[in-house]
Image: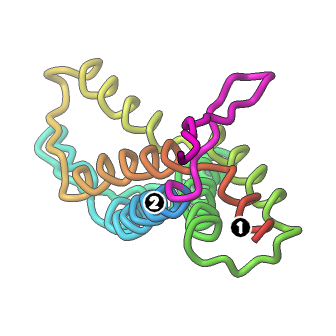
């Protein structure tokens, strides 16, 4: 008579997280890679295309995120320009690239994976693309009738980039790094 094998779940005794099964690790990495590639592709139109068109006293102007940073540098607002550059472009882009590295590219050695993971998690906390989106909405509500705004073509790419970046972070399974290194 054949023995009956029960399905077992392995979970962390400290936090209770259930570990992924072998078959799910590849799926998790594929989901993360797909979302990170999507975020990477959408990142460029989000920062390069005009995100807002502002009309004030009959004058219209369009600006992209990168264009706004360049204007801040030209007007001497170096501190503000640097902060916006770091938190809206450099940190989010680095986070996306590191997610791609951890889930798809695998350029770094196994020993560097832990550092890459910690760096990606830290940058994720400091990247401000999603907060910037909320700032746009608050600005539109506060200024009301004094100034008219129209969203530019970059707003859709911006919203989708934020969403894809969040999906990539949520679907990433850090246990996959260690499972690959055991094989």
Q: Magenta residues? A: 1-24
In the displayed structure, 14 sits above or below 159; it is above
State how far apart marks 2 and 1 are (Cα).
13 Å
Residue appearing at x 58%, y 66% in the figure: 103
State which quarter of the image contains the C terminus.
Answer: bottom right
Please indicate whether residue 95 sits to the left or right of residue 119 in the image. left
On residue 27, the disc is: 2
Q: Pick the residue in front: 139 or 155.
A: 155
Residue at the right extreme, as displayed: 111
Can residue 183 be seen here? The reply is: yes
Callout 2: few (<14), some (14-19), or many (20+) C-alpha neighbours within 10 Å? few
Tell me the quarter of the picture where residue 111 sits: bottom right
Please indicate whether residue 47 sits to the left or right of residue 110 in the image. left
Counting from the top left corner in percent of width and height, residue 9 is at 61, 34
First reached walking from the N terminus: tag 2 or tag 1: 2
Counting from the top left corner in percent of width and height, residue 123 is at 68, 48
In the displayed structure, 7 sits above or below 118; it is above
Residue appearing at x 52%, y 64% in the figure: 26
Residue that carries the numbered disc 1 in the rendered image: 180
- Magenta region's main secondary structure? loop
In the displayed structure, 176 sits above or below 103; it is above
Element carrying mark 2: helix
Q: Pick the residue in front: 12 or 167.
A: 12
Element carrying mark 1: helix
Can residue 67 be seen here? The reply is: no
Q: Is residue 61 magenta?
A: no
Callout 1: few (<14), some (14-19), or many (20+) C-alpha neighbours within 10 Å? few
Please indicate whether residue 31 sits to the left or right of residue 113 in the image. left
């Amino acid at each position: 008579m054949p023995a009956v094998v029960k399905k077992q779940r392995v979970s962390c005794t400290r936090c209770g997280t259930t570990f992924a099964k072998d078959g799910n690790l590849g799926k998790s990495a594929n989901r993360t890679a797909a979302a990170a590639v999507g975020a990477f592709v959408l990142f460029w139109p989000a920062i390069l295309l005009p995100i807002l068109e502002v009309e004030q006293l009959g004058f219209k102007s369009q600006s992209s995120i990168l264009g706004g940073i360049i204007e801040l540098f030209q007007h001497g607002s170096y501190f503000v320009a640097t902060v916006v550059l770091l938190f809206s472009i450099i940190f989010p882009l680095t986070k996306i690239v590191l997610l791609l590295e951890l889930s798809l590219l695998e350029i770094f050695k196994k020993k560097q994976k832990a550092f890459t993971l910690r760096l990606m998690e830290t940058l994720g906390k400091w990247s401000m693309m999603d907060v910037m989106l909320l700032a746009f909405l608050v600005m539109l509500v506060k200024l009301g009738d004094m100034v008219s705004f129209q969203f530019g073509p970059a707003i859709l790419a911006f919203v989708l980039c934020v969403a894809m970046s969040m999906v990539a972070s949520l679907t990433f399974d850090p246990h996959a790094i260690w499972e690959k290194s055991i094989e």
